[in-house]
Image (cartoon, rainbow, N blue to C red):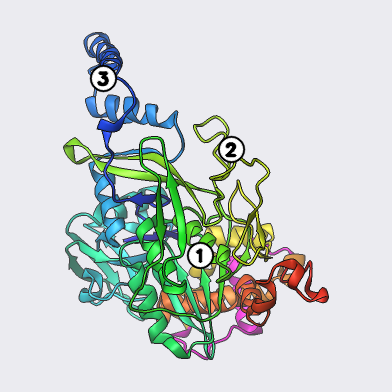
Amino acid sequence: MNIRAPFIRRLVLTGCVLSLASLLYSQTEVPADEVTQESLKFAQVYSALEENYMEPLDPDRAIFDGGIRGMLSSLDPFSSFFDPEQFEQLQQFARGTARGFGTILYVSPGKVLVLQTAQGSPSWRAGLGPGDEIVEVNGTRLDRLNLPSLIELLQRARSQPARLGVIHPGRVVAQDFELNPAEVSTATVDKAFLLQPGFAYLHLTSFDQKTPQEVSDALSRLGGPSLKGLLLDLRDNRGGVLDAAIVIASIFLKPDLLVLTQRGRAVAEKSFRTFTVPAHFELPLVVLVNGNTASAAEVLTAALQEHDRALIAGEPTFGKGVVESVAALSQKTGLALTTAQYFTPSGRSIQRPLPGTGLEAPQSGLAVASNPSQAFRTDSGRPVAAGGGITPDVAIPAPARDPWITFLNQRGTFTDFASEYLTTHGKVNQSFAPDAPVLDLFRDYLGQQRIRVPEEYWTQDQDYLKLRIKVEVFNLVFGLAVGDEVETRGDPQVQKAAGLFPRIPTLLKPPAARPTAARGRRSAE
């Protein structure tokens, strides 16, 4: 089960660029006798603790959580030790699967609603769907649990057979369902539709082994060669499998173009280039990014930017320019260790400095030692910045939300109101659009929940309130995919990014080659 409380909680590990190469410990530069001496120190300390500590030691907690994780935490934020459960989740993530029932849930105190079930999953086969309310799990009434206990119960239940009590929309009596967990395929292209005729929109949540095929299939389904443009949304994409990013770059770039260069102390320098793929698309590209666009997502973004293949829009990216090699250890555990830094086609690093870690002063470029003042440029000569993420070609700030709206979203008020509205008014069709009477009902509902309505916010937030109500009603009636499309179409960043397609040829030229009137226009405002 994936949980939305009131947002979707992803129950997988993300944020790493995963290399398929094993860690070659034999290549370490530390002499074997020094390694032995340091290992003996650790063994002596552990032996003293085991013999003399006031309580018996838990070996897993002392060694895994204490010794190993403590040592890794002194290096950088990305090197990690995985216990057996975490390592299995990491492997599932790389495969694009997750063990569970294939359900995305909305969770608030006392209420659990189904938003979506994956086709072919245990929940889908059982007949669960949007709007169903889960009221009992393995004999435990959910309305009696606080939020932390509720989430803990749901997370625990997803790994073992479960008996669910479910009330379908329009019913009052719960029906029992027996579900057995299975490995369920998880889509990384979670949104794919036409913004307008001929212009596609794709949102990628992460990169796994299936992502390139998902991208190719989605574009073919939306029009293939007849498409006039693609808005590729990489906001909140924290990365994943590096190989997948290289294949996706190959879908849009010509073959044999440099995507990145990898360099580390114990690994040989290696370059990754695009190659010929079955499906290749030459349509105009706008890539939308933000501060949570990281790692493999930045690799793809930088390659498209520096080869002048796409216009990058949005906000500066996270700035993660290092590679973790992942190795299996004994007892089904694993280790992700930062072994290399990567550099974009122009030779720049996008790793932001992290004070107090091994990345306090990352190398800013491949040739920086011989030419510290080196300027990094795209193929056409456009300047690009190094040392702290990717700066968009066109800045599109995220809309600021007032504190009242933030409170309503965090509390899950819109979903709760949508559920109550459907209970009293029945299902709606896709022509449903919240009007003044619906807003009046919403205001009455806020009063019943003892939520204050500041008049200044109520007046200025009318359009946003209507959008959020419509989104949550559609989530519960038609499923998360339909609700997400409604929300995306109403997103100001998406709307502004979609308006950039006519300006792509001008904005991808170096500043000196642009028409005078277009120079300096770096914002979509």
Cα–Cα gap, marks 1 and 3? 45 Å
User: Residue 94 occupies which quadrant of the picture?
Assistant: bottom left
Amino acid type at image mark 1: Leu
Q: Answer whether residue 362 is magenta in the image.
A: no
Which residue is the extreme one toward the front? Answer: 370
Amino acid type at image mark 3: Ala
At a point 21% along the width and 9% down the height, the residue shown is 51
Mark 1 / mark 2, whichever is N-terminal: 1
At a point 37% along the width and 66% down the height, the residue shown is 247
Amino acid type at image mark 2: Ala
**Local secondary structure at mark 1:** loop
**Local secondary structure at mark 3:** helix
Mark 1 / mark 3, whichever is N-terminal: 3
Of residue 384 and residue 236, the one placed in the foreground of this image is 384
Residue located beneath label 1 in the image? 234
Q: Is residue 231 left or right of residue 149?
A: right
Give above or below for 28 relative to 35: below
Residue 262 position within the rendered picture, expressed as x and y whole percent measured from the top left:
43, 48
Q: Which residues are magenta?
A: 425-454
Closest to the camera, between mark 3 and mark 2, is: 2
Q: Quadrant of the C terminus?
A: bottom right
Q: Quadrant of the N terminus?
A: bottom left
Residue 6 seen in render: no
Residue 369 is tagged as 2
Q: Answer whether residue 450 is magenta in the image.
A: yes
Residue 32 is tagged as 3
Residue 311 position within the rendered picture, expressed as x and y whole percent measured from the top left:
60, 70
